[in-house]
């Protein structure tokens, strides 16, 4: 049986801040689906392991294990976590050794019993469709490319009738709710694409959902306009959200604008936290990655906020701000790069290990995640990786 093994880049990978080293890049969402899910759908294979610098998967989602022990041997496909396939079936003729996109190798095909020695840049290749990902900012590019067809794909499955008392602008057939709790007065605008609301999600009166939009299972939309975004599982959101990805288990329960941003797991955005997603000059957004300068090629880009980061009320984030995992922002306005575990918006103070673990132990049970000894150890290991970085 052919294995599917995903390959993370070798650290350091500054372009993937603030997510590299926190959880595998393949678990980040490129559209509705994670990069791993996109590869699995394209190749009709289940991921068996991770290679490279992939961090161990953290709560609450299980993931493929890291490859340990003997060398990887075929038959296998070693696929890059820095590429998001379209999701359409990938087929290639016998004898293919590489899959490429725009001349870049995105996967390697191992013959039976062939050992993996790193990616060769030669050999017969088959071209595939998808998006090359140059860093975390390209998750917004992926959202723009994949969200509409991803949401439309849900139309093939049965959906509930349009909830009573809803206001629909556009095609009611593109209101795709499944066992969700929808209060009367919610506006569904499907003129730009389908609106998908998964099982157990709650949409309160005063919310306007503009497609394409995906609201995952048990997420809560508490009011305000949402458009062209992915709201991951168990997130609570309120206020204006545009062209953004909430990976999951994050909290934005108050007003404030979030646009063209990627929000990691267990992030809490305090009341009034607002992201700028457009420079006053309307020019290209560049990222400051703690000394490295990265042009993004994007005109619209908000904030990239790592797992377990927290912002105080009224926090204002400049265009292209990167907030490291575990950072706790308060006080002065933050700069465009906030290092991991920062304690305060400026200065060199860092969260202590005890403080980081104590905060997580308070937060996780709020989403019904038990802090088992295994979870505590994973969090402790995360703290030390962030501190060392």
Image: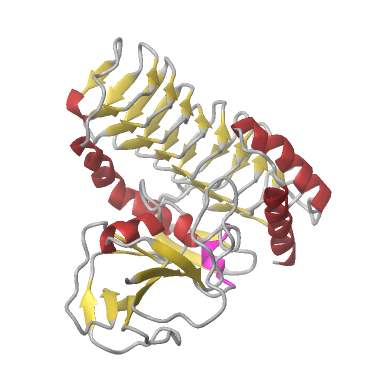
Q: Is residue 135 magenta?
A: no
Q: Quadrant of residue 163?
A: top left
Q: Please state if 380 lies on the left or on the right of 122 as rendered.
A: right
> Which is nearer the eye, 272 or 9?
9
Give the position of the C terminus as an image quadrant.
Answer: bottom right
Q: Is residue 13 magenta?
A: yes
Q: Residue at x 36, y 80 (%)?
A: 74
**Residue 284 visible:** no
Q: Position of residue 30 (x, y in %)?
A: 38, 53
Q: Work out whether 248 lies above or below 223.
A: below
Colour mapping used in the image:
secondary structure
Instruction: Tell me the magenta residue range.
Output: 12-18
**Residue 31 visible:** yes
Q: Position of residue 50 (x, y in %)?
A: 49, 68
Q: Please state if 94 lies on the left or on the right of 212 as rendered.
A: left
Q: Work out whether 247 lies above or below 257.
A: below
Q: Residue at x 19, y 74 (%)?
A: 92
Q: Position of residue 378 (x, y in %)?
A: 68, 55
Number of labels in the image equals 0
Furthest residue in direction front, as rendered = 1
Q: Residue at x 45, y 87 (%)?
A: 117
Q: Work out whether 230 lies above or below 184.
A: below
> Which is nearer the eye, 276 or 112?
112
Q: Please state if 122 lies on the left or on the right of 230 as rendered.
A: left
Q: Quadrant of residue 316?
A: top right
């Amino acid at each position: 049986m052919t294995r599917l093994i995903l390959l993370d880049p070798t650290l350091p990978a500054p372009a993937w801040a603030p997510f590299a080293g926190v959880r595998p890049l393949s678990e980040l969402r490129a559209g509705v689906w994670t990069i791993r899910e996109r590869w699995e759908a394209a190749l009709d294979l289940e991921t068996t392991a991770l290679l490279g610098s992939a961090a161990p998967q953290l709560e609450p989602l299980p993931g493929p294990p890291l490859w340990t022990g003997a060398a990887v041997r075929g038959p296998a496909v070693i696929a890059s976590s820095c590429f998001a396939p379209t999701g359409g079936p990938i087929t290639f003729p016998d004898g293919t050794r590489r899959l490429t996109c725009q001349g870049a190798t995105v996967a390697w095909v191992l013959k039976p019993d062939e050992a993996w020695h790193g990616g060769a840049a030669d050999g017969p290749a088959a071209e595939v469709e998808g998006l090359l990902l140059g860093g975390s900012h390209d998750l917004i590019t992926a959202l723009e490319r994949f969200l509409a067809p991803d949401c439309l794909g849900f139309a093939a499955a049965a959906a509930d009738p349009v909830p009573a008392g809803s206001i629909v602008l556009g095609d009611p057939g593109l209101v795709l709710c499944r066992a969700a709790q929808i209060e009367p007065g919610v506006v569904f605008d499907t003129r730009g694409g389908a609106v998908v609301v998964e099982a157990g999600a709650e949409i309160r009166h005063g919310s306007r959902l503009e497609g394409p939009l995906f609201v995952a299972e048990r997420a809560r939309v508490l009011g305000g306009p949402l458009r062209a975004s992915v709201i991951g599982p168990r997130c609570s959101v309120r206020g204006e959200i545009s062209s953004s990805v909430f990976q999951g288990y994050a909290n934005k329960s108050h007003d404030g604008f979030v646009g063209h941003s990627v929000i990691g797991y267990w992030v809490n955005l305090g009341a009034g936290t607002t992201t700028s997603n457009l420079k006053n000059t309307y020019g290209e957004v560049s990222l400051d990655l703690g000394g490295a300068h990265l042009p993004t090629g994007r005109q619209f880009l908000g904030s990239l906020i790592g797992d377990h980061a927290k912002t105080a009320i009224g926090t204002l984030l400049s265009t292209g701000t990167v907030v490291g995992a575990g950072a706790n922002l308060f006080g002065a306005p933050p700069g465009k790069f906030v290092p991991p575990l920062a304690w305060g918006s400026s200065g060199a103070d860092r969260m202590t290990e005890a403080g980081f673990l104590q905060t997580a132990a308070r937060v996780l049970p709020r989403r019904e995640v038990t802090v088992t000894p295994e979870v505590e150890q994973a969090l402790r290991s995360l703290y030390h990786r962030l501190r060392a970085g």
